[in-house]
Image (cartoon, rainbow, N blue to C red):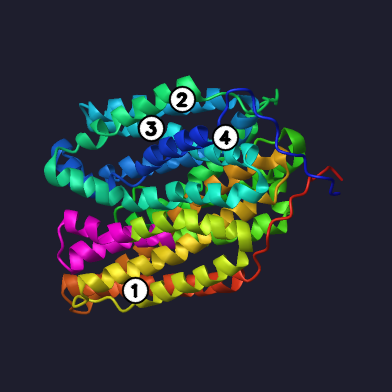
């Protein structure tokens, strides 16, 4: 393996303007990623309307996550095989059709199917956005641009419950889709008019066995992790260890297959030959575990322990999401000046302090205290996301950009599912133990949440140590030995 000079950014075709193109891609990605967490607070209303149990209603989120886990690994190949314009239009058409179908869904089964169609578009959009930024933006400006991407990755899931809470407080659940549909149509129309091809497609063959192994691996892991929380509550239809074992075995086979295929790999795992990429990806995964774990736990705490309404709970979480969004571009500019470590290490420490402070939450905690600690956590994560993603992807040679983007996006989904599973399982078991010990439901729930945040604090402490190993990316072209 040897290093050669990194090729310069390719000359863009005539008529392609970086600013409007990035703005369109970021806006479109924000809308589609928002839908990943928008359904959570609507589940009680949907259960009542369609007459389904909680375990069935949960499939509206589980099916979305499973589809993402299955499709995202294939995007590395798709982004090499097809043009930016083709992939963007496919993503927005899929998302738009899914949104319209969900808004008009006459039955629960149709609504689940619509969520799957939506998820296909969402899965394509995030790697597309990251790969495009790496391709058209000079290295010295990537921090600023990746800061903009961080708004999509971190803020969209964070504000999803808030937006759905506001909509459900005033309107029928179908308006969560009807309000998004015009925006999706606008993005599709602007994309058809503005998006031009900025990459050269490569006629790479599709390895069908890799696709099958990928679906079993990442689909099995995400489904198994998503089922752990339900299993702890006694509602899982399948023992979680079954899909987890299947996923782990398939993942080992998938990695072996990709190493054997080398340049013909569906998802080139040689990205992990870069130490900078590997360290940054581990920290991104830990950060996503913390983000999604708190996103699932805090609404439960606010509603079940503090007794807030769905709308009020969403509004309590809004300042944190806004803080993360406002900080992301600033952090991106700082990264371009000082590199990752001066931002990531303090960010990991701040996030860890916030998670440890959350262990003090109890039935008497004030709403202002929850807002303050959540904002503190958001600030810590904001200091981490942009530098980590820029360092990870910027350390790769150009021919691995698409694979690196797909790898990061895939691991984000798995880490998000793992964080949700860990926090919910620990909370549920603590809650059950508390009730058995004679505590009230509110006290038992608070006790379970306290224990869950203890686990989160321990994980975040390990992240602080890993953060010290983050380095400024030194891109290399990885050649075959």
Tell me where residue 317 sits by quadrant. Answer: bottom left
- In the picture of the structure, the residue carrying the numbered disc 1 is 358
Badge 2, how many Cα within 10 Å: few under 14, some, many 20+? some
Does the stretch in magenta take in 352?
no
Tell me where residue 402 sits by quadrant. Answer: top right
Question: Can you see residue 390?
Answer: yes
> Label 2 near label 3: C-beta < 8 Å?
no
CA separation in Å, label 3 and label 2: 18 Å
> Label 1 near label 3: C-beta < 8 Å?
no
- In the picture of the structure, the residue carrying the numbered disc 3 is 118
Badge 4, how many Cα within 10 Å: few under 14, some, many 20+? many
How many numbered marks appear?
Answer: 4
Of callouts 4 and 1, the N-terminal one: 4
Residue at (59% x, 74% y) in the render: 465
CA separation in Å, label 2 and label 1: 43 Å
- In the picture of the structure, the residue carrying the numbered disc 2 is 191
CA separation in Å, label 3 and label 1: 34 Å
Residue at (21% x, 59% y) in the render: 313
User: SS for tag 4?
Assistant: helix
Residue range (magenta): 290-319
Vertical placement of 179 versus 201: above or below?
A: below
**Residue 75: mark:** 4
């Amino acid at each position: 393996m040897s290093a050669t000079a990194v090729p310069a950014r390719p000359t863009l075709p005539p008529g392609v303007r970086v600013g409007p193109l990035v703005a369109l891609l970021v806006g479109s990605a924000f809308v589609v990623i928002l839908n990943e967490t928008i359904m959570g607070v609507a589940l009680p209303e949907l259960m009542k309307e369609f007459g389904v149990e909680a375990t069935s209603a949960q499939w509206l989120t589980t099916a979305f996550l499973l589809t993402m886990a299955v499709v995202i690994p294939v995007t590395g190949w798709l982004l090499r095989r097809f043009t930016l314009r083709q992939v963007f239009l496919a993503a927005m058409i899929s998302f738009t059709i899914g949104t319209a179908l969900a808004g008009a869904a006459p039955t629960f089964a149709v609504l689940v199917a619509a969520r799957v169609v939506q998820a296909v578009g969402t899965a394509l959009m995030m790697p597309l956005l990251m790969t495009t930024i790496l391709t058209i933006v000079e290295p010295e400006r990537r921090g600023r641009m990746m800061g903009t991407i961080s708004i999509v990755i971190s803020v969209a899931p964070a504000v999803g419950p808030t937006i759905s809470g506001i909509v459900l407080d005033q309107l029928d659940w179908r308006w969560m889709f009807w309000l998004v549909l015009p925006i999706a149509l606008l993005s599709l129309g602007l994309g058809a008019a503005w998006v031009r091809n900025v990459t050269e497609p490569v006629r790479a063959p599709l390895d069908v066995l890799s696709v099958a192994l990928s679906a079993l691996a990442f689909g099995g892991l995400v489904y198994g992790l998503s089922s752990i929380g339900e299993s702890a509550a006694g509602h899982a239809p399948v023992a979680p260890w079954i899909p987890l074992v299947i996923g782990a075995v398939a993942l080992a086979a998938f990695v072996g297959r990709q190493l054997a295929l080398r340049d013909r790999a569906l998802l080139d795992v040689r990205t992990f030959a870069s130490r900078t990429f590997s360290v940054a990806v581990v920290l991104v995964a830990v950060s996503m575990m913390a983000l999604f774990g708190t996103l699932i736990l805090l609404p439960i705490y606010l509603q079940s322990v503090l007794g807030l309404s769905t709308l009020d709970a969403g509004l309590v979480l809004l300042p944190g999401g806004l803080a993360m969004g406002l900080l992301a571009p600033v952090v991106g500019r700082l990264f371009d000046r000082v590199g990752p470590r001066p931002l990531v290490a303090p960010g990991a420490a701040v996030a860890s302090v916030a998670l440890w402070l959350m262990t003090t939450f109890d039935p008497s905690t004030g709403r202002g205290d929850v807002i303050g600690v959540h904002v503190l956590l958001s600030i810590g994560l904001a200091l981490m996301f942009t530098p980590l993603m820029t360092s990870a992807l910027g350390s790769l040679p150009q021919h691995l950009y698409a694979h690196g983007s797909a790898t990061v996006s895939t691991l984000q989904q798995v880490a998000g599912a793992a964080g949700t599973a860990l926090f919910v399982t620990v909370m549920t078991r603590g809650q059950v133990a508390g009730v058995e010990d004679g505590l009230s439901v509110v006290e038992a729930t608070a006790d379970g949440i306290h224990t869950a945040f203890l686990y989160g604090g321990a994980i975040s402490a390990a992240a602080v140590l890993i953060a010290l190993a983050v380095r400024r990316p030194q891109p290399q072209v990885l050649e075959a030995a």
